[in-house]
């Protein structure tokens, strides 16, 4: 049996990942760290309202978990400032990773992005790559990096590019 701590469960990918975790018999419990109550707790899912930007506010909730999953990110990067994007998609996940490592979490999973590369000239890809490099340097027993090219949701949440994809993609 595995226990998982998660950051980002209220987003499109996080909600889908949480549904999967809840259905897995080998997952004993899931602890959600959220900046506000989401109503997702129940059964084997517990929720802790914390300051996601301050690992000290949630460090005690990491103890005893074997795995962590981070799906946190700005909903539409093109509408966020570089500073906000960096804070949400790099700084907070990196601090979460370090806090998990410090608490003895062995397996860390991250929703990253296709093309992540710390040497990229493209700000988005470079920032995501720097996050991955930072996590690799932490020495987790297992690190899983997921690189989706485009995340499609049933409703258009991300603008014109997703509207086009929804129109042509089954």
Image (cartoon, helix red, strand yellow):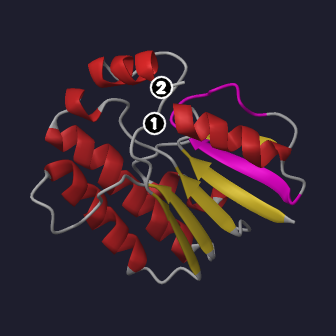
For label 2, the SS is loop
Residue in the foreground of this view, choosing between 48 and 118: 118
Q: Whole-percent x and y of residue 139? A: 48, 84
**For residue 156, which quarter of the picture?**
top left
Q: What percent of the width, then of the height, locates residue 72?
A: 46, 44
| Image location of residue 132, percent across then percent down | 36, 67
Assess whether residue 43 is covered by the magenta stretch: no
The residue that disc 1 covers is 151
Q: Is residue 158 left or right of residue 15?
A: left
Q: What label sits on residue 169 in the rendered view?
A: 2
* Residue displayed at 53% across by 74% down: 101
Q: Is residue 109 left or right of residue 4?
A: left
Relative to the observer, which residue lies in front, 87 or 27? Answer: 27
Which residue is at 38% across, 62% downward?
94
- The quadrant holding residue 41 is top right
| Residue stretch rendered in magenta on the structure | 26-41
Q: Residue 33: within the magenta?
A: yes
Q: Nearer the viewer, residue 97 or 165?
A: 165
């Amino acid at each position: 049996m595995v226990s998982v701590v998660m950051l980002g469960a209220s987003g499109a990918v996080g909600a889908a990942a949480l549904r999967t975790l809840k259905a897995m018999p080998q997952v004993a419990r899931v602890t959600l760290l959220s900046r506000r109550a989401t109503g997702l707790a129940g059964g084997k899912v517990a929720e802790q309202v914390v300051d996601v930007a301050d690992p000290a506010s949630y460090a005690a909730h990491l103890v005893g978990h074997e795995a962590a999953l981070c799906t946190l990110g700005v909903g539409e990067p093109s509408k966020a400032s570089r500073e906000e994007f960096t804070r949400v998609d790099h700084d907070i996940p990196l601090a979460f990773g370090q806090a998990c490592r410090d608490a003895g979490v062995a397996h860390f999973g991250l929703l990253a992005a296709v093309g992540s590369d710390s040497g990229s000239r493209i700000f988005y890809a470079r920032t995501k790559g720097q996050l991955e490099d930072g996590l690799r340097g932490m020495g987790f027993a297992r690190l899983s990096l997921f690189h989706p090219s485009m995340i499609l949701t049933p409703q258009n949440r991300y603008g014109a590019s997703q509207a086009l994809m929804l129109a042509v993609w089954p």
